[in-house]
Amino acid sequence: MFDGWLIKFGNVVLPNSFILADGWESTPNQRVELDAYRDANVLLHRETSENFKTSLTLNIRSMDLAEMTAFKNVVGLATLEITSKRERRLAVTYWNDEELAYKNATMYMPDVTYSIHTVDESAKGIEYNPFSIELIEY
């Protein structure tokens, strides 16, 4: 049953308002080939792992520095163990679009590129452009 949210980091739901419209992309339950070959009759034989992996892309809206701080707090990178922080390893619960159910996963987040739209020197503020984060299941 869908509870109205798409992703949770640890026990904290990422508010949908952070994700752009059309900003949720998922490739759920990706099959991993252990072995594949074609025989003399050119028939394909596949040995596929029983462990399926999911990858997610979240396209995040523009935000100011305070919102970026809140976003980072939800993702929780600042509170992870040092090894998990270095690897950007995250405990995630996400909506699996293939199974139409929530799934738990350990995922990592590759490097993120941030782009600054404006800097307000007098208010000491930053306005960030939209950006994307990718999450890949271990």
Image (spheres, helix red, strand yellow):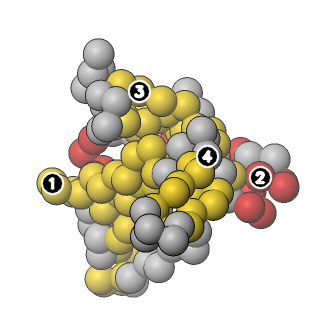
Measured in 3D between alpha carbons, the distance from the residue under mark 2 to the one under mark 4, in whole angstroms, is: 26 Å
Find disc 4 in the rendering and name its residue.
49
Front disc: 4 or 3:
4
Q: What residue type is labelled 4?
A: Ser
Q: Which amino acid does label 2 sit on?
A: Ser
Measured in 3D between alpha carbons, the distance from the residue under mark 4 to the one under mark 3, in whole angstroms, is: 21 Å
Camera-side residue of 25 and 28: 28
Q: Is residue 115 left or right of residue 105?
A: left
Q: Where is 30 relative to 116, above or below? A: above
Front disc: 4 or 1:
4
- Which SS class for mark 2? helix
Snapshot quadrant of residue 101: top left
- Which SS class for mark 4? loop
Find disc 1 in the rendering and name its residue.
21
Camera-side residue of 15 and 8: 8
Front disc: 2 or 3:
3
Snapshot quadrant of residue 34: bottom right
Find disc 2 in the rendering and name its residue.
84
Whether residues under marks 4 and 1 lie with C-beta atoms below 8 angstroms apart, the answer is: no
Measured in 3D between alpha carbons, the distance from the residue under mark 2 to the one under mark 3, in whole angstroms, is: 23 Å
Whether residues under marks 1 and 3 lie with C-beta atoms below 8 angstroms apart, the answer is: no
Find disc 3 in the rendering and name its residue.
102
Q: Which residue is drawn at 60% across and 41% down?
A: 51
Whether residues under marks 2 and 4 lie with C-beta atoms below 8 angstroms apart, the answer is: no
Measured in 3D between alpha carbons, the distance from the residue under mark 1 to the one under mark 3, in whole angstroms, is: 20 Å
Give the percent coordinates (x, y) of residue 6: 33, 37
Sequence-wise, the earlier of marks 2 and 4 is 4
Q: Where is 93 relative to 116, above or below? A: above
Q: Residue at x 53, y 55 (%)?
A: 46
- Which SS class for mark 3? strand
Sequence-wise, the earlier of marks 4 and 3 is 4
Sequence-wise, the earlier of marks 4 and 1 is 1
